[in-house]
Amino acid sequence: MVTFEQLTQKCNDAIAHLKLEYSKLQSGRASASLVESIMVDNYGVKTPLKGIANISIPEAKQILIQPWDRDSLVAVEKAIKDSNLGLNPQNDGVVIRINLPPMTEERRRELSKLSHTYAEDAKIAVRNARHEAINSYKASEKAKEISEDELHAKEKKCRKRSTISTKKSKK
């Protein structure tokens, strides 16, 4: 039987994943999270960029990447180009600079669609976790492990916990 704690954990994982995906969106302002998870082939081992380089933001529209080992500059540059983020790294032999282009209306629409897709995926993950829990409770009730009243109470608790609100809470 799926416990309420397992349901809560799955919902929290879905929301955490949504936040991670949102942080990776290129919103016109430079952010280290945009490139830190890019996998770089470093001496035959795939390593996240944040594990082999310092990533800093010297200006609002620029990302500066300084690998700890200069021999990995070319590999970092290649990984950024291959990442399909639409970024153009500039290698000066010591550091890699990435200048972010200004946002266009087309890119804004694309980001809006992408963010809606991410949100819908998170909602689906939460909905699936809720259905799994409720089905587990129904199976327990059918096997006479819990009463019908307990089933309804657990279903209500699941529905209340797994509701994703898109409204901002006022504090």
Image (cartoon, grey):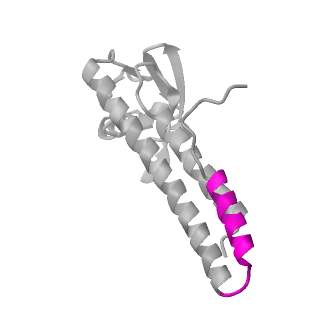
Left or right: residue 121 versus residue 143 is left
Q: Which residue of the protein is positioned furthest toward the left in this rendering?
A: 106
In percent of the image, x 51 and y 62: which residue is there? 128
Q: Is residue 143 above or below residue 167?
A: below
- Residue 60: x and y, percent? 48, 13
Q: Which residues are magenta?
A: 143-161
Q: Main secondary structure of the magenta part?
A: helix
| Front residue of 124 and 14 | 124
Q: Quadrant where the N terminus lies? A: bottom right
Q: Which residue of the protein is positioned furthest toward the front in this rendering?
A: 149
Left or right: residue 84 versus residue 136 is left
Q: Is residue 77 above or below residue 163?
A: above
In percent of the image, x 30 and y 38: which residue is there? 84
| Front residue of 24 and 58 | 24
Displayed quadrant of residue 168: top right
- Residue 138: x and y, percent? 61, 76
In percent of the image, x 61 and y 81: which residue is there? 139
Q: Quadrant where the C terminus lies? A: top right
